[in-house]
Image (spheres, rainbow, N blue to C red):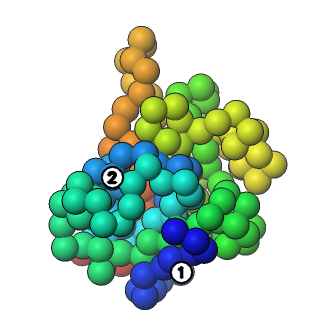
């Protein structure tokens, strides 16, 4: 997909953004589209993607929520970052020491996650725009958790800190 593709919905200024860097599994992105529709976060995807938008697994996981979510596809990371202005960029990684609950999230913040098999590459983790590397705690000896689940945990913590603004 060349260039950015964005749905037509817009949300209030309190919205957070989720960025998936080169996601590979359609079902995880579909589930996160449902998360975006239900919480009002924007979902940003950085190419290359491991699937296309006609993928049955993406459609099934997203159910009928695709039209209720703001999803933007960017050709590369720099293009995505340029759309966020000066927003904080939190890179979620198993190698971080700062727990996600110690961050004071602000409206417009970007919660960035890496591809399912490998996470964020070193050059992305150390990018000058990254505000802080953060982690979700888990038991020792475990490699990682599901991408869509991690995004949901982080989104709900950021939203909780702002009183679930706009939610019912």
* Above or below, 152 relative to 11: above
Which residue, given by chain and number where applicable, does mark 2 sit on?
Answer: 26
Residue 46 placed where, x, y %? 57, 58
Q: Quadrant of residue 137?
A: top left
Name the mark on residue 13: 1
Residue 86 placed where, x, y %? 75, 67
* Above or below, 138 relative to 45: above
Residue drawn at (42%, 81%) of the image? 7
Instruction: Tell which of 59 and 126 is nearer to you.
Output: 59
Q: Is residue 39 left or right of residue 42?
A: left
Q: Is residue 62 visible?
A: no
Q: Is residue 10 left or right of residue 32?
A: right
Residue drawn at (30%, 66%) of the image? 54
Residue drawn at (53%, 50%) of the image? 22
Q: Quadrant of residue 165?
A: bottom left
> Which of the two labelled residues, at mark 1 and mark 2, occupies the earlier sequence position?
1
* Above or below, 60 relative to 114: below
Q: Foreground mark, 1 or 2?
A: 2
Do tag 1 and tag 2 residues touch (Cβ < 8 Å)?
no
Image quadrant where one finds the C terminus: bottom left
* Disc 1, SS: loop
């Amino acid at each position: 997909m060349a260039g950015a593709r964005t749905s037509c919905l817009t949300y209030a200024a309190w919205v957070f953004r989720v960025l998936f860097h080169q996601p590979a599994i359609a079902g995880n992105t579909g589930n996160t589209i449902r998360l975006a529709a239900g919480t009002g976060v924007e979902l940003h995807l950085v190419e290359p993607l491991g699937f296309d938008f006609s993928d049955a697994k993406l459609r099934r996981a997203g159910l009928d929520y695709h039209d209720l979510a703001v999803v933007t596809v960017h050709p590369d990371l720099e293009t995505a970052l340029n759309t966020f202005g000066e927003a904080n960029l939190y890179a979620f990684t198993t190698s971080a020491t700062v727990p996600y609950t110690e961050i004071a999230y602000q409206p417009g913040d970007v919660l960035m996650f890496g591809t399912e098999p490998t996470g964020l590459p070193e050059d992305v983790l150390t990018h000058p725009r990254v505000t802080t590397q953060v982690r979700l705690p888990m038991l020792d000896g475990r490699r990682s958790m599901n991408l869509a689940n991690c995004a949901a945990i982080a989104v709900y913590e950021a939203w909780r800190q702002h009183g679930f603004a706009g939610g019912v």
